[in-house]
Amino acid sequence: MMSTTDVLTKAGMSRHQAELKSELFRRLTEAHAQMHGQPPRAYFIPGRIEVLGKHVDYAGGRSLTCATEQGFCMVASPRDDWRVRIIEPIRHLEASFPLDPQLEPWVGDWTNYPMNVCRRIARNFPRNLPARLRGCDIAFTSDLPEAAGLSSSSALVVGVFTAIAEINNLKQHPAYASEIKSDLDLAGYLGAVENGLSYGSLEGDRGVGTLGGSQDHTAILCAQANTLGCFKYRPVQLESRVTLPDNHVFVIGVSGVHAAKAGNAKDQYNRASELASEAAALWRNKTGRSDMHLAAVADAEPGAADQLRTLLKNAKLNLRQRADQFLDETYNIVPNACEALAEGDLTTFGELTDRSQQGAENMLGNQVPQTVFLAKHARKLGAVAASAFGAGFGGSVWAMVHEDDAQPFAEAWSSAYQVAYPNQAHDASFVITRAGPPAMRVG
């Protein structure tokens, strides 16, 4: 039988990171044994890097993503009742709730995400007594920085759903079999679990309160080690994969400015989504067409993107800028960046990434001084490319560098940030990762 370390390295994770995860799984298994005597199933659920494609997924756009080597380690065993008990033993977190269609999630708490998963499962995949849904005991921990734009919340959603779905053999449920036929479908569905929308015949619900899409879930479930995936959304489609340049890795600069999707940060995040919807609604009102999102508008007919810009000419500035950023990111930056990487043209890739970052700063308007500094200084230090990513209004910046330079680069980047932003430096961190493997069962 293969060890956890061997399973992870075979999937494409570096030996060092696989050994770190193996130790986390050992600690989890010990904690889980106090909850449940049965040997648990074990899962690794990565975070994700949005390389390019800022705020495009919920509007049907295109993005370039990969998984991180950091993520959630999770173990789970079935219970004899319909409750889900979930613990994080290192930080002493614990919660328990039923698989109940009337479950009331605790908004503003970390449990909002797993509770929404339980509520949606109970609503979309009901079981009649005596074969009702079966609960489980889950223990988890993570080496993924929180509220850093690396999609820790979506990773938790994926992990909890995966454990409950396996324990209940949801793939055999008629509603599941009808709507979810692939990991791409599952990513689309889990995006709908978060944003509250329906997915085919699987009726929507309240969601967690953010108007996001399914990019994060797609990257987590459909990544391949050492490659970047180009995906289009609504519905989720894999367009291409491109191999990461030889011997290059990502250094993630976590700014220490939390990108939590709650309170005012949630409102700011949702505003970008609302503007995209508003632009598409204006198009429908003016043209009489039924195109439901910005990508459907741009793909409607030849010249539709230019028609949209003309219609928005007299609209408010932030609406025009939102449409321009979306169109440039989806139809110019991402496809041209994929082509540049495929051809080994790192100079052009870096220039396109700079353009994406400028769009986020000047048109999307979701950057803070700390992420602007990190992106610019990474380029000064010699990064092939660097960009902020995720929801914005804080979070992280990725920098692509040669693996031989990664550690000294991270140290120099960190030192410069400490001087520039000493108040955030104590919450900042600098993490090295390859493009990692997707979510997987490891034992």
Image: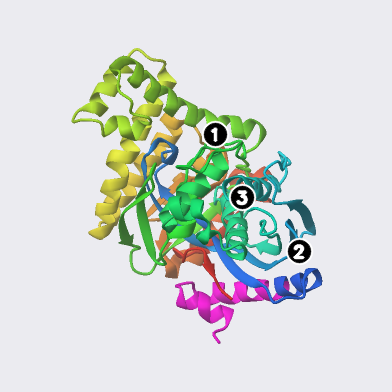
Residue most extreme to the top: 314
Could you say where residue 352 lies in the image, as x and y percent from the top left? 32, 45
Q: Quadrant of residue 132?
A: bottom right
Could you say where residue 265 lies in the image, as x and y percent from the top left? 61, 34
The residues tagged by marks 1 and 2 sit, at their Cα atoms, a distance apart of: 30 Å
Residue sitting at x 46%, y 48%: 188
Q: Quadrant of residue 404?
A: bottom left
Left or right of 172, for residue 89: right
Point out the image quarter for the N terminus. bottom right
User: In front of the other: label 2 or label 3?
Assistant: 3
The residues tagged by marks 2 and 3 sit, at their Cα atoms, a distance apart of: 34 Å
Label 2 sits on what residue type?
Answer: Ile
Vertical comparison of 403 with 263: above or below: below
Q: Which residue is mark 3?
A: 126
Label located before the other in sequence (1 or 2): 2
Residue interval drawn in magenta? 1-27
State whether residue 219 appears in this view: yes
Q: Which residue is mark 2?
A: 90
Label 3 sits on what residue type?
Answer: Pro
Membership of 356 in magenta stretch: no
The residues tagged by marks 3 and 1 sit, at their Cα atoms, a distance apart of: 33 Å
Label 3, secondary structure: give it.
loop
Vertical comparison of 93 with 149: above or below: below
**Circle on res. 331:** none
Label 1 sits on what residue type?
Answer: Tyr
Could you say where residue 59 lies in the image, as x and y percent from the top left? 40, 35
Q: Which residue is mark 1?
A: 269
Label 1, secondary structure: give it.
helix
Tell me if mark 3 has few (under 14), some (14-19) or many (20+) residues whose alpha carbon lies within 10 angstroms of its own: some
Residue most extreme to the left: 302
